[in-house]
Image (cartoon, rainbow, N blue to C red):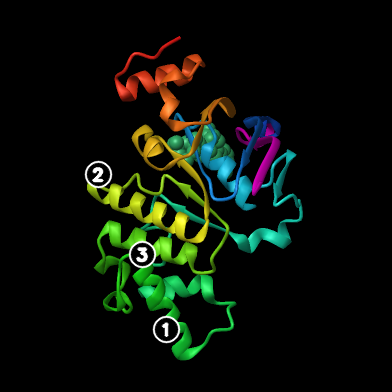
Amino acid sequence: MLLEAKDIHMSFPEGDGLFRRKRKEVLKGVSFELHKGECLGIIGESGSGKSTLGKVILGLEKQDSGKILFEGSELRKQWQSEMNVVFQDYTSSVNPKFKVYEIINETLLQSKLSGEDKRKKIIELLEQVGLNEDFYYRYPHQLSGGQLQRVCIARAIAKMPKFILLDEAISSLDVSTQVQILDLLIELKEKYGLSYLFITHDLTAVTYICDRVLFFKDGQVVETVNNTNKLKYVKDEYSKLLLGSVLDIEISC
Ligand SMILES: Nc1ncnc2c1ncn2[C@@H]1O[C@H](COP(=O)(O)OP(=O)(O)OP(=O)(O)O)[C@@H](O)[C@H]1O
Ligand SMILES: [Mg+2]
């Protein structure tokens, strides 16, 4: 087991002034397990709390209650560096004034590599994501969306984490670029035994890359499908609705 979420509750303050004491519960007792080398999909409607769950896992938000365990340990300091993230909005997740090598170097700042060794490492990373040395000194605005998302993936894998959170990581790309990025993610996962949590609205992408999938609604997991080939056998009403609307198939009862 790589990652375990146990009964996570999380709320945000709601309203202004006096009413700010009221809180809105966004995660309502979320539990799941992510195995080593697995890609677990989380699919659900907008506002259902998927990104909030991702932020809690990364330690960017603190849950009200519940536990996150990584390789059985609750001590975030011990495993924080084993995690990284790729967001949907690749343009705002990079500093526009940074060149490609500086963007990737953000993850390598604490590494002992220096000078030529670091340069070689960055070029190696660029090659791993299907780019090359020519991109080294380019600025984000000189790259296509797909190329920039590849740079973000290179930054995410630079320290060889065990876990990468992919929050709508392919959603802003056109369909053929989406397939290329999914193929790249599958290749990296197999090569390095990475585990992914793949947050998405896109069921086709889920069937392409995920081993298992959680259906998320209103801050709760309503159904877990352990085999993405068996998606059409979902039982929960919401999962059926979601699947029926996207896949245009009749869902069996
Ligand atoms: N920092 C915050 N302060 C207050 N409310 C927040 C905050 N972040 C998120 N929320 C609220 O929590 C709820 C869940 O948001 P979240 O971003 O997790 O949804 P999501 O499932 O990722 O949606 P989408 O698919 O649109 O990305 C929303 O109602 C949102 O407005
Ligand atoms: Mg989101």
Q: Which mark is residue 129?
A: 3
The image position of residue 17, as x and y in percent, is: 65, 36
What is the magenta range?
A: 1-18
Tell me if residue 70 is in the magenta stretch.
Answer: no
| Image vertical order of residue 171 relative to residue 80, above or below | above
Could you tell me the amino acid type at mark 3?
Answer: Val
Could you tell me the amino acid type at mark 1?
Answer: Arg
Tell me if residue 10 is in the magenta stretch.
Answer: yes
Displayed quadrant of residue 8: top right
The image position of residue 105, as x and y in percent, is: 47, 75
In the picture of the structure, the residue carrying the numbered disc 2 is 175
Closer to viewer: mark 3 or mark 2: 3
Q: Secondary structure at mark 1?
A: helix
Left/right of residue 243 with respect to residue 222 in the rendered view: left
Identify the residue at horizontal 65%, vertical 60% (top origin).
80
**Cα gap from disc 1 to disc 2, whole angstroms:** 32 Å
Identify the residue at horizontal 43%, vertical 17% (top origin).
240
